[in-house]
Amino acid sequence: MREREVRGFMDTVDEIKQRLDIVQVISGYLPDLKKSGRNFKAVCPFHSEKTPSFFVFPERQSWHCFGACGTGGDLFAFVMRKEGVDFKDALAILAEKAGVTLVQRQPEEGQSEAGRLRQINEAAAEHFHHLLFHSAGGQRTRDYLARRGVTEPTMRRFQLGYSQDSWDSLRQEMLKRGYRESELLAAGLLVQKEKEGSYDRFRQRLMFPIRDAAGKVIGFGARALDDSLPKYLNSPQTLIFDKSGSLYAIDFARAAIRKENLAVVVEGYMDVIVAHQNGFANVVASLGTALTEKHVGVVKKLTNRLVLALDADAAGEMATLRGIEVASHTFDQKVVPVPTSAGLVKYEEQLDAEIGVMVLPEGKDPDDVIREDPREWERLLQGAAPVVDYTFDLVVSRLDVTKARDKAQAVDQLLPLVAEIKHPVRQAHYLQRLSRAVAVDETTLAAALSQIKPKAPGLRREAGPAPVSRPAPHNAPGDLLAEYCLYLLFTYPDLRSHASDLRVDFFVNTEDREIFLAWHEAGDLDRARQAVDATLVEHLDSVTSRSLPPLHGEEQKRALRQCANRLRERWLKDRKAKEQVLISELEAAGKPTDLQEIQESAVKLNAELGEVFLHGKEKRKRARD
C-alpha cells in the first residue's frame, strides 16, 4: 500500500479508519476469529472464557464482548486495550498498518521545553552513570550496591549512577555541554540560591534515573551515602516529572505485567532492582508515596490485577487504607448478571479488578525477602489477602470491639465496604463476619446496610480504551452529535453541574472519548489541552473553536440535556441491536441458560429506551403547552 503524507490530525485518523478494516486488523491478533452470520466472533482476548462472546461488527466497524468484561469500542480502542498503549501509540501502530505517514505536529513552546528537559535528564543520567564506574566515590557506591546483592549487569541495565560530593560539579559539566542554568533549574537538577546563583541538588548520593513508560528519563531518585538527611531525595515537580504519577521501572516491568496479568507495587528503588534481578519483572515502586489515582491509571493500562507489598509497619497503619481505597475506585467497573430473589437476573456494576495486599515479615523489606529466599517471595505473593479481608483485619485490630464506641466505629468503617460488594453470597459472607467481629446481631446490621445508598458509578479516567465502550450504529469519520456536546461542555463551564447524565460510553470514536475524559478530569480548556495527549490537541481545538450562535441561561442547559438524551438513546439502540445478534446466535446454538441472561438484559434495555421515549414525549408536550 502506497504511503502518502497526511495533513492534519483528523485527516490522519480518518485516513486510517478508511484504509483499515476492523475484521482484518483484529483477526491479526485473534487467529480464532470466525464468521458468524454477518458478523465475526472469537474467544474474548480480555478475559478467560470457553464459549466465544467477543463479536466484531463489520458494518459498524466496531467490536463488543458480551461476556464478563463487557468491553467494546472502535478499532483504536481495541489496539489500545490489546497492546496496553495510549491513543498516541495506537495511532502509530495503526498508521503503520495502513501505510499512512504520520507528520509530526510543530511542537508548541511547552512541548518543546518538555523535550529539552528530557534531553537534559538523559545527559545527567549518563554523567552520573559514568561517575559510578570511573570515580573513587563511584567505587564506594558500587561496593555498597554489591553488599545489597546488586550485580554489575543490573547496575548497567538500570543505569544507576553516583553524584559527587560537590556543590557544582554537575552544574559545571552540564554548562560545558551547552545547557543553560535556567534549563537545569527547570529540570530540578539545580537549586536556586536565595540571592543569586545555584547549586547541585544531588550530592554524594546513589542515583536512580526515573523513566516514563516509554523509557525516557523524567527525574531522579537519590539515596544518601552518608548521614545526610533526607535519606532519599527525589527530583521536584517539573514539567515532565510528577512523583504522584510516576512508577519506578515501569518501562522494564511493562511487558511482564501484561504477560503475567499482575502488577506488584513496592515502595523502594532497591526493592524493584533486586526483584527484577531475580526474575520478578512485574514489580514497580511508587517512589515512597501512597498509591494515587495516577499510579493506578498507569497500571490499569496493563492489567486489572494489583498487589500492594507492605512492610509490617505500613500494613498496620490506617493510612494504608487510603491507597487501597484509591486503587479500588480508580479501576474500572464491569457489568455482570446478578440473580435476584424473584429468580430473575439484574445487571450491576462490579469492580473489574483484583486487588490484594501482601504483608511482609516484620523487619524485612521486599529485597530482603527476595535475596534470602525467592521462593518465600512467591509464597507471600500467592498468599496476598483480598483487599476486603485485609481491611477487615486491620480495622478490627485497631479497635477494642468490646466497647460500644469502638464497636460503632468498626461498623461505620466496614459496613460501607460490605455495601459495595455486589455479589449477594460474598456480601452475606462479610456481613456475617462483621456480625461476629463486633458481636452485633446480623439482622441489625442488615437493616443498617439497606440504608446505605450505593455510590454513583461516576466517571473514571480511562488510561487506554473505555472499559464499557458501546459504539453507535455508525462509524462516521466525525461524530457531529458528540462533538457538539463537547463544544457545549468546554464553551459553557457552568454546565459541569448539569452533565451527570453523560457517560463516556456514549462517545463513539476513541478520540472524542479521550477529549471527554480530559474535560472531566481537567475542568477547563487550558488544563484539558495540557492533560490530553499531544496528538489530540488539534482535534480538541477543532471541536472547541467552532463559530456558533451564543446560548444564554436555560438555552445552554436545554441544549446539553438534548445532547445527553440523544447520545443515550443512540447508545441504547446500538446495544439492543448487538444483543439481538447474540440472541440469534444463542438460539441457533441451543443454549437456553445463556439466552435467558441476554434476554433479561434486552428487557432492561427496552425499559431504558421506553424511559428515553417517554421523557422526550413529555418534554415536547411541555414545549407545546
Image: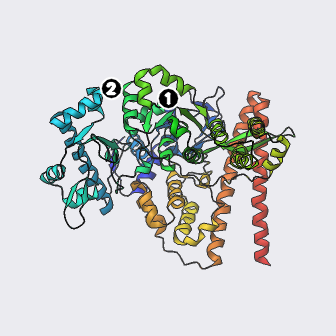
Residue 554, x across and y down, in percent:
65, 77
Would you identify the image quadrant in which residue 343 lies? top right
For the residue pair 254 and 374, the one nearer the viewer reads as 374
Secondary structure type for disc 2: loop
Residue drawn at (79%, 36%), measured in percent from left and top? 596
The mark total stands at 2
Residue type at mark 2 is Gly
Identify the coloring: rainbow
Q: Earlier in the sequence, mark 1 or mark 2?
A: 2
Residue 159, x across and y down, in percent:
27, 36
Q: Which of the numbered marks, if any, corresponds to residue 149?
A: 2
Q: Residues within 10 Å of mark 1 (few under 14, many from 20)?
A: few
Q: Which residue is mark 1?
A: 260
Classify 265 as above or below 558. above
Residue drawn at (79%, 72%), measured in percent from left and top? 621
Quadrant, the C terminus? bottom right
Secondary structure type for disc 1: helix
Q: Is residue 572 visible?
A: yes
Residue 201, x across and y down, in percent:
26, 52
For the residue pair 598 and 349, the one nearer the viewer reads as 349
Judged by depth in the image, the label closer to the viewer, 1 or 2, is 2
For the residue pair 386 and 469, the one nearer the viewer reads as 386
Residue drawn at (56%, 51%), measured in percent from left and top? 475
